[in-house]
Image (cartoon, helix red, strand yellow):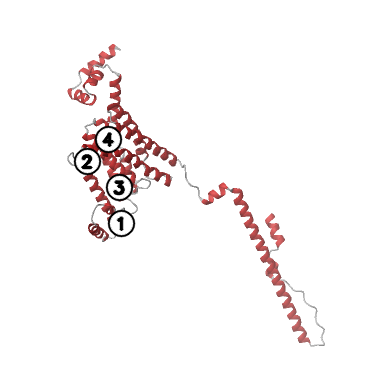
Amino acid sequence: MPGLQGALQVVTHSLPLPIQQLGTAILGETCYTTLIHDVSPTSACLRLFLSKGLGLGIILFGSILKLPQIVKIVRASSGRGISLAMYSLEVVAYTISLAYAYRRRLPFSTYGENASLTVQNMAITLLLLYYAPAPNHLVRFLPLGPSVQHRIRLRFSAAATADDARRLDVALAGTLMVLCSFILFHPTLLAMPLLSLLQATTIPVSLLSKVPQMQTLHASRDPGQLSSIVVFAQLAGTLARVYTTRTETDDALLLWGFGLASIFNAVIAAQYIYYSNGGGRRPSTAASRSSILPSLYSARKEKADDDDSDAYDEAGSVLREKEMFNGSAAAAATTIEIAIDRGPSSPAPPMPTPTPHAAWRDAPRRDDHKKSRLD
């Protein structure tokens, strides 16, 4: 072991100065000297090294975390299965948390991914507004006078197209995002105590942002355009952030926020797995009727067939009686005409036997019909 340590020290002592400065900036002078320069690791420095490594990995992966979701929405030209409310609330929570961490000068490895995730969440929100089935008409939520809102509506209703209304929604939302971000990051426009209060509110806001997505998955029972990469990467990221926040900072607000977000992300991941495998699908009415109550369904069908058979037999009996009556009447009329032509002295011919009509001969008999049904 001493021989290995001495061989490693030969390498670490000859590292270029920029690498030494970078290592000192990341680990601190004490841990860099103990862990890298002297190759004499301690438990505290090992935990810090692991936390910094996880943090930098999250930052790098976070920069492309939601790109699969963006690509999926653009390719499908649809945001089906994705909650607009969830991403809108995430934009609020991520922007406040990013401004809070930046202005408190926390280590960049503890919040660096928030910068790219905030931008990606903003892009997804704007895409959901643009590809919405119907315009959201965000102008009605602006604190503008009735006359100003009326002029804006007249200006964009003249085109009489839903695409123009969607573009207005995207423009208003983008402008509002930029304006609010500028206020949050500017120390003279928003005092630090007020920003700390807003950071405390991001915990319930971030948790509530997950509820619409849970409701959307439960209602549709279909992930739709929701990206599996984003779902499971978010879960892994929040779990890793629990460790890095606990190791590198003493900020209870961030720790509780990441811990509760991990629970909610785990619920969404479980829903995705369950509904992706066909769980919770509602069966069709005919299938449920024949699968749940097969005996009752078949009994009702047999009864309906019996009723149809009885009605058919009764119609055949009426037809036979009618044809027999018509045949008897025609035979009687023929006999009377012959008697009139022969005169009173001529003997009357015998009554002809009525011949049943072809329809009467071809009419199905009740016994034959039941026999065929039995066969």
In terms of sequence position, does the residue under pointer 2 or pointer 4 come before the other?
Answer: 4
Q: Position of residue 43 (x, y in %)?
A: 30, 19
* Few, some or many residues within 10 Å of mark 3 (<14, 14–19, 20+): many
Residue 116 shows in the view: no
Estimate how packed mark 1 is, as few (under 14), some (14 to 19) or many (20 or more) residues with alpha carbons within 10 Å. Answer: some
Towards the viewer: 19 or 103 = 103
Position above or below: 233 against 285: above
**262 or 323: nearer the viewer:** 262
What residue is at 64 percent from the left and 59 percent from the top? 307
Between the C-alphas of marks 1 and 2, the distance is: 33 Å
What's the CA distance linking mark 1 and mark 3? 15 Å
Residue 113 badge: 4
Can you give x and y, in whole percent of width and height, for residue 155 in the image? 24, 59
N-term mark: 1 or 2: 1
Give the mark, 1 or 3, whose residue is nearer the N terminus: 3
Q: Provide the secondary structure element on which disc 4 rests.
A: helix
Quadrant for residue 36, please give it. Answer: top left
Q: Indicate the amino acid at tag 4.
A: Glu
N-terminal-most mark, 3 or 2? 3
Residue 184 marker: 2
What residue is disc 1 on?
162
Disc 1 versus disc 4: distance between alpha carbons?
Answer: 36 Å
- Quarter holding the C terminus is bottom right
Measured in 3D between alpha carbons, the distance from the residue under mark 3 to the one under mark 2, in whole angstroms, is: 24 Å
Q: Which residue does the numbered mark 3 point to in the structure image?
A: 127
Q: Are marks 3 and 2 in contact (CB under 8 Å)?
A: no
Residue at x-position 70% and y-position 69%:
320
Task: Answer left or right for 209 relative to 329.
Answer: left
- At label 4, counting other C-alpha atoms closer than 10 Å, the crowd grade (few under 14, some 14-19, many 20 or more) is many
Look at label 2 and name its amino acid: Leu
